[in-house]
Image (cartoon, rainbow, N blue to C red):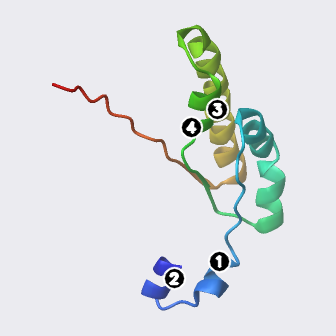
Amino acid sequence: MEIARAKGLDPKEALKGVHVAKVFNTGHLMALVRGLGRKILETKARLVIVDSAVAPFRAEYTGRDKLAERQQTLNTLMHELSRIAELYNVAVVITNQVQAALSLI
């Protein structure tokens, strides 16, 4: 809404073109991505944003013993998003959380 106002646009009108899906876990994320092509065609979307893409993976795949499985599933997600970008000629933007290791002295 702030961006729309700054550009002199009506925020409610600008948001009519924004579709949001909240993700609850990696299975849900993967299901949404599998259905993304249909949604792109329905809405004529030109941009797909996946915010904090790795967050559900970190929550579900904890510990070193799950690292390989997590990376494999994450790799599948990235390849699918890349394929969608190419197939439907849309821009795909993926954000990620950054974690810093703090050392206490």
Instruction: Give the residue pinned by disc 2.
Output: 4
Amino acid type, mark 2: Ala
What kind of element bears circle 4? helix
Q: Earlier in the sequence, mark 3 or mark 2?
A: 2
Q: Mark 4 and mark 2 in contact (Cβ < 8 Å)?
A: no
Give the CA distance from mark 1 to mark 3.
29 Å
Does the CB distance between marks 2 and 1 fall below 8 Å? yes
Residue 85: image location, x then y, percent:
64, 47
Q: CA distance from mark 3 to mark 2?
A: 32 Å
**Which mark, by number, is residue 79?**
3
Query: Split into 4 quadrants, where in the image is the C terminus?
Result: top left
Residue at the location (75% across, 66% down)? 44
Instruction: Name the quadrant containing residue 17.
Output: bottom right
Per the image, the residue denoted by label 4 is: 55
Q: CA distance from mark 3 to mark 4?
A: 18 Å
N-term mark: 4 or 1 = 1
Instruction: Confirm or deny contact between disc 3 and disc 2 (CB under 8 A).
Output: no
Say the numbered circle drawn on residue 15. 1
* Residue extending furthest toward the top: 65
Q: CA distance from mark 2 to mark 1?
A: 9 Å
In the displayed structure, would residue 65 be above or below residue 72? Answer: above
Q: Give the label, 4 or 1, closer to the camera.
A: 4
